[in-house]
Image: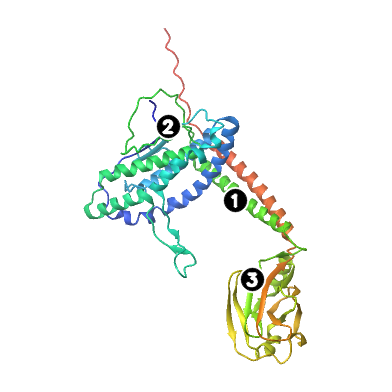
């Protein structure tokens, strides 16, 4: 019976410092920063490997060894920190095997991989394992709670992360008070980590061997007789190769963002109605004589930029009989300051907030005033200008009780250009990213083969 191709091993390095685990989160921050970049590269290279396997049946060796290095690095940091707390030896900044470190990970390189299996194993076939590994590792720093009043739906909690986190917490408390790491807990923690890493390797296409449904506890895997394998020299990724591949993967990852933004801009461009892109309506209502906005201040550079980006602005009330006007705040002050009105302080499609200003009824209807920059009934068009502005909605006869369904629309003349620029940026980022990945692959080197000794002369 052959050994499973993903080997995860660890040895407990005792004695361990009683209190060092309290600050390991701080000591590991440099590793977390580097790993965040390396895992972005890992994700991009896994997508590249997906297509390579689909068309050739092979996982490119250089990419395989890079991703294996990321898993090794991650396992060493997890073992040092809160994935196990099994050593106080600081993890090396390395993608290599590091056999002297107390946590090791190795994956046998597969000569051939199934082209059809690559389509389903990472999502469909791995679902049972995802459920189990979720129990081992689930947990987050932020939890969603919709039952708390006035919380906006979000409540911050501190979870330890599934069964592994719970067991590591128990081990940490034992360590703090007794100076010993319970060996039974250690065996369980390593067994769960081993299961999770095997599933990670399978789901990221690095093996076709289905992970076994067994919890192999302990630091050392059970040796099994296996068929001899042909030796393969691992590719070595130097600093130049790692940096180049990671930078290329980050550019390719950024291209996903610009592509998504470009697609969104294209959808918005196609959803214009009569040349305008309109927001959802928001209902506002008052028992007084007018509704106004907060003061809208637009600087000279800001007005130019807004005219370029937003174009012409349209404001509608949803009722063709309502008066709507925009005026310079200072010019409208003498009229508004005598009115009883509500100032809208918060406006969303589902909710609005108001601040009431006491006063009396207007002496004359709003349309009789001459200070309006632009005004109309039910709808107005406005070309943005610098200044301090206020928007006012009233009944045309100046009576009390005003209700409106406000919508804001803009022509967005630059949207087509933005869409084109985003797609061009996507192309440039993809090309640059894959060029850098190829350069990084070229920079990676395999150890030189030892020269064969000449046969002895008889």
Secondary structure under badge 3?
A: strand
Is mark 2 in CB contact (under 8 Å) with mark 3?
A: no
- What colouring does the structure picture have? rainbow
Indicate the position of residue 311 as horizontal and vertical percent values: 74, 67
Quarter of the figure with residue 279: bottom right
**Distance in Å between CA atoms under marks 2 and 1:** 33 Å
Secondary structure under badge 2?
A: loop
Q: Quadrant of the N terminus?
A: top left
Give the number of the disc on residue 282: 3
Q: Quick check: can you spot residue 315? A: yes
User: Which of pointers 2 and 1 lies earlier in the amino acid sequence?
Assistant: 2
- Name the residue that disc number 2 marks: 5
Give the number of the disc on residue 254: 1
**Distance in Å between CA atoms under marks 3 and 1:** 35 Å
- Is 310 left or right of 454, judged from the image as shown? right
Mark 3 or mark 1: which is in front? 3
Estimate how packed mark 2 is, as few (under 14), some (14 to 19) or many (20 or more) residues with alpha carbons within 10 Å: some
Looking at the picture, tell me which residue is in the foreground, 442 or 131: 131
Q: Is residue 19 above or below residue 206?
A: below
Indicate the position of residue 120 as horizontal and vertical percent values: 54, 37
User: Which of pointers 2 and 3 lies earlier in the amino acid sequence?
Assistant: 2
Q: Quick check: can you spot residue 74? A: no
User: Which of pointers 3 and 1 lies earlier in the amino acid sequence?
Assistant: 1
Residue at screen point 59% across, 30% down: 56
């Amino acid at each position: 019976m052959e050994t499973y191709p993903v080997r995860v091993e660890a040895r407990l390095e005792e004695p361990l410092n009683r209190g060092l685990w309290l600050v390991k989160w701080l000591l590991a921050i440099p590793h977390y920063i580097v790993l965040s970049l390396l895992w972005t590269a890992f994700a991009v290279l896994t997508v590249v490997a997906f297509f390579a396997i689909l068309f050739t049946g092979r996982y490119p060796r250089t990419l395989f060894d890079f991703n294996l290095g990321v898993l090794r690095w991650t396992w060493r940091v997890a073992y040092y920190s809160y994935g196990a707390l099994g050593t106080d030896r600081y993890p090396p900044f390395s993608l290599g095997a590091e056999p002297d470190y107390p946590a090791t990970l190795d994956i046998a390189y597969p000569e051939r991989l199934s082209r059809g299996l690559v389509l389903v194993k990472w999502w469909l076939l791995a679902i049972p394992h995802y459920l189990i590994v979720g129990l081992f590792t689930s947990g987050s720093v932020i939890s969603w709670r919709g039952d708390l009043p006035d919380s906006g739906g979000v409540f911050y909690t501190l979870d330890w992360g599934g069964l592994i986190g719970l067991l590591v917490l128990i081990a940490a408390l034992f360590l703090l008070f007794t100076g010993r790491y319970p060996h039974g807990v250690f065996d369980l923690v390593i067994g769960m980590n081993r299961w999770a890493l095997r599933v990670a390797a399978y789901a990221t296409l690095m093996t076709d061997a289905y992970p076994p449904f067994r919890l192999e506890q302990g630091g050392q895997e059970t040796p099994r007789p296996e068929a001899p394998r042909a030796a393969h020299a691992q590719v070595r990724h130097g600093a130049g190769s790692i940096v180049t591949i990671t930078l290329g993967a980050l550019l390719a990852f950024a291209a996903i963002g610009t592509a998504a933004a470009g697609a969104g801009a294209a959808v918005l461009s196609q959803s214009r109605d009569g040349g305008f892109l309109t927001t959802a309506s928001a209902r506002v209502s008052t028992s007084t004589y007018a509704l106004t906005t907060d003061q809208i201040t637009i600087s000279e550079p800001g007005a130019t930029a807004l005219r370029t980006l937003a174009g012409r602005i349209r404001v509608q009330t949803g009722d063709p009989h309502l008066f709507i006007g925009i005026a310079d705040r200072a010019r409208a002050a003498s009229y508004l300051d005598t009115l009883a009105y509500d100032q809208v302080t918060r406006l969303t499609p589902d909710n609005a907030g108001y601040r009431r200003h006491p006063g009396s009824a207007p002496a004359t209807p709003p349309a009789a005033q001459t200070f309006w920059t632009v005004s109309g009934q039910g709808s107005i068009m406005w070309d943005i200008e610098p200044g301090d502005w206020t928007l006012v909605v009233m009944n045309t006869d100046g009576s009390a009780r005003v209700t409106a369904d406000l919508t804001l629309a803009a022509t967005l003349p630059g949207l087509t250009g933005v869409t084109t620029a985003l797609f061009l940026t996507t192309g440039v980022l993809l090309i640059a990213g894959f060029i850098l990945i190829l350069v990084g692959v070229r920079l990676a080197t395999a150890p030189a083969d030892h020269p064969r000794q000449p046969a002895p002369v008889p």
